[in-house]
Image (tube, coloured by chain):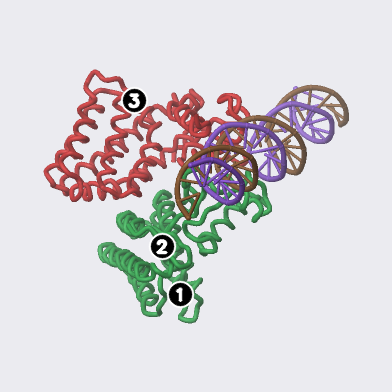
Chain colours: A green, B red, C brown, D purple
Amino acid sequence: MPQMQDIQAKLRDMILSLDLGPGERLSERWLEAKFKGSRTPVRAALIRLEAEGLVQRDGRNWTVAPIDLGEIEALAEFREPLETTAIRLACQRADAADIDALEALLDSCGPGAPREEWHRVGTEFHVALARLSGNPFIVKAMQDIMTRLARPRWLEVWTEPTRDQAWVEHRRMLDMIRRNRPDEAVREAVEHIRDTRDRLLRSLREDKRGLKARGFAVISR
Amino acid sequence: MPQMQDIQAKLRDMILSLDLGPGERLSERWLEAKFKGSRTPVRAALIRLEAEGLVQRDGRNWTVAPIDLGEIEALAEFREPLETTAIRLACQRADAADIDALEALLDSCGPGAPREEWHRVGTEFHVALARLSGNPFIVKAMQDIMTRLARPRWLEVWTEPTRDQAWVEHRRMLDMIRRNRPDEAVREAVEHIRDTRDRLLRSLREDKRGLKARGFAVISR
DNA sequence: GCGTCCATAGTGGGATACCAATATGGACTC
DNA sequence: GAGTCCATATTGGTATCCCACTATGGACGC
């Protein structure tokens, strides 16, 4: 069992699940004890997680990346041209089976499913859609984006109407791709991206007090 | 003197300058001797350069990333929406001083300048343009793109007409941004990106024999 | 009390030691 | 001579060690 990848995966999970709070300091020694490995693989994992944006240097120290509202805006701006490009390419390149698979992914998450499932499927939908573009850089960028959005999405106040709205938006995007109507699919996507951004920002801003109470570092802008 | 960053920078330079051939195997021990450091900083540098796409794992080994013609196509596809978005944002956000600075950058490279200068200025132009978007993710992506394109650009057969063509295209893009005509600037950019892609692909394909003779790994597609 | 200063504990960066896995090369067999 | 097999060198992965630096906190002087 490769130790480094194991540590990297576990640490990533701890960060994404907010088991380690945003802004929290990480010492290599603490992590080495926590994972019962040595500092070498811990350091390798930290370097890689730094590239993912989940961990940062704060002077000489390692810290869990804070929640950054400005980053959420910048990500939406970055994501819009990428996801719309992915959609246009998918319209040209994806076959019916690809689209059926995506549909099945959406279907796999019904009203009774736990929140973790919705979260996972939502992420995977966008990455899989990017994959239909056939462009590895778009896929990589989308993975990166979804990783960085994972904690805000998880922290978002969770209501059925918003969940269903996102679900409907996903459906509509996919539908328009299936019918090979890229312009309309793109319009849906842009709307979805902006809706998501606004939802996340509003939710986080409203709960900023609660987040700080949990010791989470939040950068307002 | 920070050892790790030093090693990373030197190794990056050796790769980008083709001092280390594409596809060449890198052993940590050899690098440690080469840089008179120990394996710890060498490893940290390798991990970071892996994220930059300059170094890869080949099984358990490290290798210099090969020249990949498919990657050049994918990069152009990835770059188009990003650079056009950067231009539109720059039109909204950049002030005259920003644009003057970019113009000065282009002016800094006259007909008599050495090839290294043209190369550096060409790279910096696109990154600086991305910076005018104000979006750190676009900047980061553009840096990444230019890094990956650096070796193909360097290997391109070098003629004054092609050099001047790129120079004219840069000028026109900047001009249209200054006049706040984003659509035309975007049209120039798309043309420039496609021209560049075609030039690089043609040049590399024609010289593939020569590259292999130098021991360079080239992936055709 | 309030600064100031210094001993100390803890940190990340680097160097080194050890290990399992793998690649290598030469001897041996047929 | 060609193929096979095994001893050995070398590799990357991991575990420790050592060091310079720094943050901390308590004693001391005012």
As drawn, the label of residue B157 is: 3
Q: Secondary structure at mark 3?
A: loop
User: Residue under circle 2?
Assistant: A126
- Can residue B49 be seen? yes
The reply to whether residue A178 is visible in this rendering is no
Quadrant where the image shows the C terminus of chain A: bottom left
- Report the mark closest to the observer, 2 or 1: 2
Q: Say which mark, if any, is on residue B171.
A: none
Question: Between marks 2 and 1, how big is the CA–CA gap?
Answer: 15 Å
Classify residue B121 as left or right of residue B23.
left
Question: Label for residue A107?
Answer: 1
Residue drawn 38% across and 33% down?
B150
Q: Is residue A71 above or below residue B173?
A: below
Tell me residue A171's x, y (percent): 36, 72
- Among numbered discs 2 and 1, the one appearing first in the sequence: 1
Q: Position of residue A81 (x, y in %)?
A: 30, 55
Q: On what subunit does the disc labeled 1 rest?
A: A
Both on one chain, marks 2 and 3?
Answer: no
Chain letter of the residue beneath label 3 in the structure image: B
The amino acid pointed to by label 1 is Asp
The secondary structure type at the circle numbered 2 is: helix
